[in-house]
Image: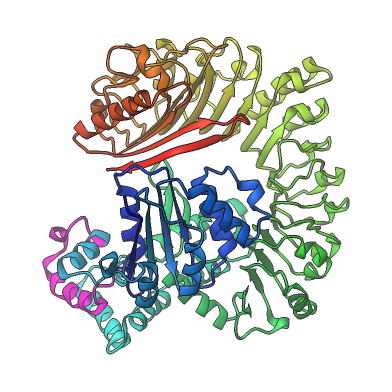
Amino acid sequence: MQHKVVSIYGTAGQGKTTLSMEVYRKITEPFDCQAFASVSKTPNIKKLLRDVLSQISNKKFDEESQWWEEQQLIRNMRDYLIDKRYLILIDDIWSVSAWELVRSALPLNDNGSRIITTTRSKAVAKSCSTGIAEQMYEAKPLGDDDSQRLFFKRLFCSPEDCPQDLMKVSSDILKKCGGLPLAIISIAGLLANRRQTVEVWVNTLKSISAAVDKDSHIDKMKRILLLSYFDLPPHLKSCLLYLSVFPEDYLIDCRQLILLWVAEALIPGQDRESMEEVATSYLNDLINRSLVQPVKVGADGATVKTCRVHDVILEFIVSKAVEDNFVTIWNRNGFSDNYSSNKIRRLSIQEDISGQAEEMMKTLKNAAHIRSISIFGDNNSVLGKHASEFLSSQVLRVLNIRGGGVGEFYLGHVKRISQMKYCRITDGTQDLPEDIEKLQHLETLDIFDTGIRKLPASIIQLQRLVRLRVDPEVQLPDGIGNLQALEELSTIDLGFQSVKFIQGLGDLINLKVLEIFWQCDTVGRDVEGHKKACISSLTKLFTRLRQLSVVGWLDATFPFMSLCGGTPPPLQRLVLSIWNKSSAVPHQISSLLNLTRLYIGLSGEVSKEGINILASLPILLSLTVFLDDKEGDSGVFHPRHAINSQGFQRLVKFTFRCWSEAVLEFEPGAMPKLQMLKLDLRARCQFKYGDGGLVLGLQNLAGLKHVALSIKCEAATADEVDSLEDDIRGAAGLHHNRPIVQVERWCLRFDGTRVQQATIRTS
């Protein structure tokens, strides 16, 4: 089969990315591997190549590739893909030269590989499709019917729900949008926050007419965005402009964004908890106005976990932020325009600064007014050498380093940065300074994945510290109970901590989120003392925790079994992975009446009683069951008493991971609101049963929309793997909702990591 490249081109805001992603998701043919990456206006080719290589190899080269140069990345990608049938989507290519570099890493072969590209330039599209016109697709403006459908979907359930007196003015508004999807949803977002009257909509039409008449498509889009921007109240303008600190196509963690807004004093109020609630409402408002795009939504259907900003909207935000001196951006071309070193308030480094660090540091030496520093991309050890100069602002509130390979970054003289409220550093940080207690305003300290193994004793003097996130192997000092403001603590391996530290956990009266790991046989001293301290502290904490994660290889005396009882605890999320010889669903779980999310990992079988315990949780939205072998024996998710119409009435997401011999059956009326079913199964178990496979009754899940199947291929023939996949596809094909099915095949390497064999998406 011939290798093909298809290129989609068109002006900004015409939905090229949306179209290409929809095609990417719905392609029904099997590929050995596939990947998606975005190039952007200022491409970081090394990062793009690493992203693609990580996806196609299922992270096989993640650690090694961090240090590879461009040509080495290209060679390794070509070697990996040369004999494979691959599907690659490269989004937002701006230049022929950028495409040539990407193409050099994608070998031509006769395996039927496919490459999809998107670009604003017809010349680039021609280069991508090697001059074959049939392989180019021009994204054209929407027609009247499609424009109307998109517009009314945002404002009403359907065109029929639009009041008749608004139909004429809505038609005139849509004409001004010129069929541009981004313009349509932007105006719809603007109108969604105004009264639905003819007068209000006519005035909006007049504003649009004055802004966009006689302009090109791009100018129209920018002017429409300007209308949306000026319609925002001042507090939302600041929050929107702050998004310019993130690079193009960056997936933004909504929780972290909210904490950053608060730390940057962009949210009014004095009480931190209420300020975070206000910030959440601001983010939802920006999403409702279609200025921010939700990417991942929680099981409740309302909580947005990750978001992004459309590149056209980001271009607009960046121009306004730079114009207003709200953010100063350093990219490959140096600083953004209109900057002055003594006026920099928020600095965002969005590209690799190797070779430019000296120049930048000279500029920043007198920049004493920097309130926040955000760093993205690969900066190796460059920043570490300049940390003392870099952290010289006495009004610094935020340090957010999200790049890879930062190197020996050291906070240095903390007295200079004593006003800092938010500190998040990843990858390669030196030990924290011994006098860290001087950071008395610090609320968030996130040093996960930095390699730090011990925290200074003075950290217990940080009286305002609310969130502490560290690597599991970190040894914390005794006296943790002094951190009375602490609300989040993760991830702590109790095997590395002293008995006194564990006892101190119980004194954290405001703790709401706790993640712990404990493997009893790693504790070289006083195992019983650790157990008693753990029981004592967790018993105290259980009356106030909202989220708890407990992972480890423990015996049956694990303290969780004695915690539940009496008044239902406030616990909303629980991760419980207890691997031992006799683990089963603890009956005490039935008392967790406020639980909405549960992950439970077990060895052995799940009985009918265990299923009933899980089904009894009245407001559970998301459930993950991980069933592993019991000393090599079979685990059985009871095939005939599996899941019936009793219980699980609000569950919308169910994940079933089972690498043992098990049958999962859904009876009529089971899980009536379930939308997402994720199955992680071992193909070899398929033929242990003669009654139809490992998953039965899929058609009984009335609300099902998505099925994700992950197949473990060890010891299974190709026919066995195909049979399991065909069973699931066949059942989904007969379902009245025609749910989207996503299939991944993989096997374990000797080091325990996964190797992806094939990824197939279909609808």
State which quadrant residue 140 falls in.
bottom left
Magenta span main SS:
helix
Tell me if residue 375 can be seen. Answer: yes
Closer to the camera in the image, 76 or 250: 76
The image shows residue 733, relative to residue 457, as above or below, that is: above
Q: Residue 700 falls in which quadrant of the image?
A: top left
The residue lying furthest to the front in this view is 110
How many numbered marks have been drawn onto this rendered protein structure? 0
Colouring scheme, one of rainbow, by chain, secondary structure, one colour: rainbow
In the image, is residue 724 above or below residue 71? Answer: above
Q: Residue furthest right?
A: 434
Q: From the top left corner, tell me how far across and down residue 540 is, in percent.
A: 67, 26
Query: In which quadrant of the rendered image does the C terminus lie?
Result: top left
Residue 471, percent across and down? Answer: 71, 40
Quadrant position of residue 165: bottom left
Indicate the position of residue 741 as horizontal and vertical percent values: 31, 38
Query: Magenta stretch containing residue 176, yes or no?
Result: yes
Taking the spot 27% from the left edge, 13% from the top edge, the residue there is: 691
Magenta-tinted stretch: 155-182
* Residue at image location 82% in from the left, 28% down from the top: 498
Taking the spot 47% from the left edge, 71% from the top edge, the residue there is 314
What is the x, y in percent for residue 421?
A: 70, 58
127 or 405: nearer the viewer = 127
Q: Which of these two is toward me, 429 or 673?
A: 429
Residue for point 80% across, 36% down: 475
Left or right: 599, with 669 as reference point: right
